[in-house]
Image (cartoon, rainbow, N blue to C red):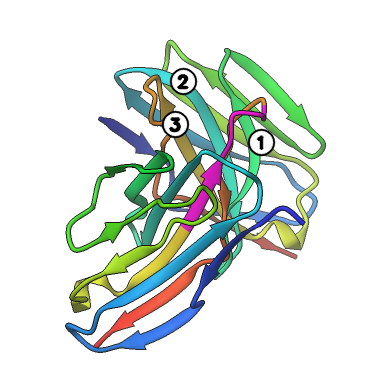
Amino acid sequence: EAQVTQNPRYLITVTGKKLTVTCSQNMNHEYMSWYRQDPGLGLRQIYYSMNVEVTDKGDVPEGYKVSRKEKRNFPLILESPSPNQTSLYFCASSGTGGVTGELFFGEGSRLTVL
Amino acid sequence: GQNIDQPTEMTATEGAIVQINCTYQTSGFNGLFWYQQHAGEAPTFLSYNVLDGLEEKGRFSSFLSRSKGYSYLLLKELQMKDSASYLCAVREGTGRRALTFGSGTRLQVQP
């Protein structure tokens, strides 16, 4: 089954404790991206990657890091989480094979930073 | 950059028709998407428009006017399961293939 898998789905942590949210897709997609979703603000892009070893900042990259060492994986790293990073995070991917190039989303990771 | 506007909330009756509007301003348009998102779940793709006109897919249709920076999503024969948020997203004509999303329209379908 074609899917984007994120882990963990739910996490409560404390300020300053480094954490990583993993994302993996099995569709051989070149493009992967991270979004955060907050009430009233919609989905905002954090980072994206056009292919292996190619990453770039989105609209709200502060406090986040990413890496793309393999095509299928695109982890999101919070080196020193702060309460304003409490949010619902979505990983998404898209490929060049489809007509529309639509994004396929993971199920989301709800992060709470105390 | 882009600015995307859509109503925050709408209410409609089961069996009826509802139209959700989206207006956008962009420096380089390369497609408009509609996604459906149920509470606590991932967005799922509904429709895509890149040329002017109406795209129909079952009970859902989407319309685009590039000259007006305007799109709408039309939902017919509403069902209770259509209660969800509907996200309008625009792709700019760059190599990023990123989508910029509006804040979403929460649709409540009532019996």
Q: Magenta part of the protein: which range?
A: A91-98
Quadrant the N terminus of chain A occupies:
bottom right
Location of residue B35 (image quadrant)? top right
Residue at left 37%, top 45%? A48
Q: Is residue A45 magenta?
A: no
Which residue is denoted by mark 2 in the rendering?
B30
Instruction: Identify the image quadrant of the C terminus of chain A.
Output: bottom left
Marks 2/1 same chain: yes
* Mark with earlier residue (2, 1): 2
Tags 2 and 1 touching, CB below 8 Å: no
Numbered circle sitting on residue B74: 1
Q: Chain of mark 2?
A: B
Q: Is residue A73 left or right of residue A80?
A: right
Residue for badge 3? B97
Residue occupying image coordinates x 36% and y 87% = A12
Q: Secondary structure at mark 2?
A: strand
* Residue A86 image point, x, y percent: 30, 75
State the separation of the CA atoms marked 3 and 2.
9 Å
Label located before the other in sequence (3 or 1): 1
Using the image as rendered, state which of residue B31 and residue B87 is in the foreground. Answer: B31
Q: Amino acid at mark 1?
A: Leu
Q: Position of residue A41 (x, y in %)?
A: 32, 55
